[in-house]
Amino acid sequence: MLNFLKNWTLPIAMLAGVLGYFMFANFTFLEPTKPFMNSLVAYLTPFLIFAQLLLTFCKVQPHELLPSPWHGWLLLFQLVSASAIAALLIFVRMEGSYKEVFEGAMVCLICPTATAAAVITGKLGGSASSLTTYTLLSNILAAIVVPLMFPLVEPHANITFLTAFLKILSKVFPLLLFPFILAMLFRYYLPKVHHFLLGFRDMAFYLWAVALTIVTAQTVKSLANSDAAVGVEVLIALAGFITCVIQFYLGKRIGTRYFDRISAGQALGQKNTVLAIWMSYTYLDPLSSVGPGSYVLWQNIFNSYQLWKKRKKEMK
């Protein structure tokens, strides 16, 4: 039973999110709990993201955090591609709901690397330490760019750019960078705490699954409450697919030049979709969360194919 749950954690978490939303939406006896659950989710999701990053960074050996040329090229691609779409959204007037299509693509591009990417990279034969370095760098990039970009793309009434910038910065910057700082403090000044956290070997994976359940429910809520046409929702999901293909392909092409094809491909292609959905739902139009929501499916289909291909090769 435990092996089944571990092998199928992704679909189980997503299914639980879908069922959870429809239960709360349709069972009247759960109505009194909605205000409490909404407040709980608002605090629980960023906490889960923080916790899984902390556990991941506790495993990082500082002397292994060596920069590589492909790190710079991938960061440049993330910055330029997301900025180009942001500029399009700011200066070109979008008709209907098609703005959400580009918002969904933008958040898929600027989103940092998944904390679980090191696990997949190791299984595929790549360098987990090189990927972890990029995970940290991509989190720094997102922590700086997102507070600058999102208020311009999705301005809110009665809120100035500076106010929106500081608000997003105060939530995103600590969420992405404090886990690394705290992990290093534990390593050098509180080794017993650091050793204790290292004992939770697979806990980051299961925290990610819980967070995925919550953000899946939020995505379903956005779809259920949206008055957008089905065609628009399909286009947002297609935008997630296109960005997924481009990033895996480009990452592998750039990585090949520096003899690190697997690590670079996973670094650019495998995204922290839990964070991306949360950012979309919180700071952009909630419907745009369908983009990173679909990205979950696309990236895991490709990862499953890669793992199957490697197992098949090893059997020969």
Image: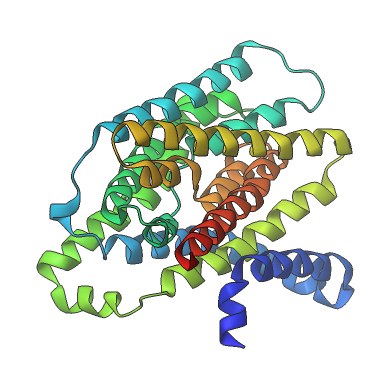
Instruction: Inspect this view and state whether residue 36 appears.
Output: no
Residue 237: name its quadrant. top right
Residue 20 in picture, x, y percent from top left = 75, 69
307 vs 167, nearest the viewer: 307
32 vs 289, nearest the viewer: 289
Q: Residue at x 53, y 62 (%)?
A: 312
Q: Residue at x 66, y 68 (%)?
A: 37
Residue 112: name its quadrant. top left
Instruction: Inspect this view and state whether residue 156 appears.
Output: yes
Residue 206 in picture, x, y percent from top left = 50, 72
User: Does 118 appear above or below 36?
Assistant: above
Residue 108: name its quadrant. top right
Q: Which residue sits furthest front?
A: 316
In the image, taking residue 19 as reference, residue 201 lies left or right, namely: left
222 vs 273, nearest the viewer: 273
In the image, taking residue 171 as reference, residue 71 lies left or right, namely: left
Q: Which residue sits furthest bottom?
A: 1
Q: Residue at x 52, y 18 (%)?
A: 84
User: Does 79 appear above or below 134?
Assistant: above
Count of numbered circles in the view: 0
User: Does 81 appear above or below 7?
Assistant: above
In the image, taking residue 14 as reference, residue 46 lies left or right, namely: left
User: Does 66 appear above or below 82?
Assistant: below
Q: Indicate the colouring scheme.
A: rainbow
Q: Residue at x 62, y 88 (%)?
A: 1
Residue 70 in picture, x, y percent from top left = 31, 33
Residue 34 in picture, x, y percent from top left = 74, 67
